[in-house]
Image (cartoon, helix red, strand yellow):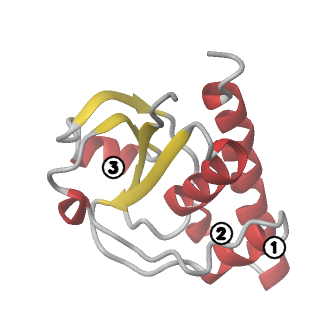
Amino acid sequence: MNKKRRILFVCTANAARSQMAEGLLRAKYGDSYEVFSAGTRLSRLSPHAVTVMQETGIDISKHYSKTLAQLEGREFDIAVTLCDRARGTCPVIPGAKKQLHRGFSDPHFNTGTDPDILDGYRKVRDEISAWIEETFDPKKS
């Protein structure tokens, strides 16, 4: 039996991008990966992120914001920073054997009507989903 690789997604607030990435990787390839997410600071889970993930059949409503300090002492095969601010704040993530960076725009800064804001979250969700398929598909590695 192969051991699951441990993946950590890191963003500033652990409110949207890292939470969506955690949910997407777990839903797509959870049999190959143990998935975590954290932020450089504590926040709260974005209700917009929950909504757009539910549209794809993935429920992240029980997720909650965590900081890197809360995961201290754990080891990860790969830690991925998903925003430039997290990468700048944490150029080295303790416990990570390898680090990657793939920045995505922050959907929290979308403005307009609620449908406009949700469209921004959908765009980021879909970009993260495509990147996860390219990067983590076990059949490609």
Residue 50 in which image quadrant: bottom right
Residue with the mark numbered 3:
86
Quadrant of the rendering where the C terminus is positioned:
top right
Which residue is at 48% across, 37% downward? 4
User: What type is the residue that disc 2 sits on?
Assistant: Asn
Q: Please tell me how crowded label 1 is: few (under 14), some (14-19), or many (20+) other residues with Cα within 10 Å.
A: few
Q: Residue at x 55, y 66 (%)?
A: 16
User: Do residues under tags 1 and 2 come within 8 Å of each other at their CB atoms?
Assistant: yes
Mark 1 vs mark 3: give the one in front. 3
The residue tagged 2 is 110
Which comes before the other along the chain, label 1 or label 3? Answer: 3
Above or below, 63 against 39 in this view is: below
Q: Where, by quadrant of the figure, is residue 5 drawn?
A: top left
Residue type, label 3: Ala
Q: Secondary structure at mark 1?
A: helix
Camera-side mark, 3 or 2 = 3
Q: In the structure shown, which secondary structural element does the residue marked by tag 3 occupy?
A: helix
**Residue density around tag 2, few if under 14, some if 14–19, many if 20 or more, within 10 Å:** some
**Residue 62 location, quadrant:** bottom right
Name the residue: 50% across, 56% down.
18
Percent position (x, y) of residue 22?
55, 55
Identified by mark 1, the residue type is Asp
Q: Nearer the viewer, residue 7 or 4?
A: 4
Closer to the N terminus: mark 1 or mark 2? 2
Is residue 111 among what the camera can see? no
Q: Is residue 135 left or right of residue 73?
A: right
Question: In this rendering, is residue 37 above or below 104?
Answer: below
Give how far across and how far down residue 77 sits, in percent. 35, 32
Report the residue marked by disc 1. 116
Residue 15, x across and y down, in percent: 48, 70
Residue lying at 58% horizontally and 36% vertically, measured from the top left: 32
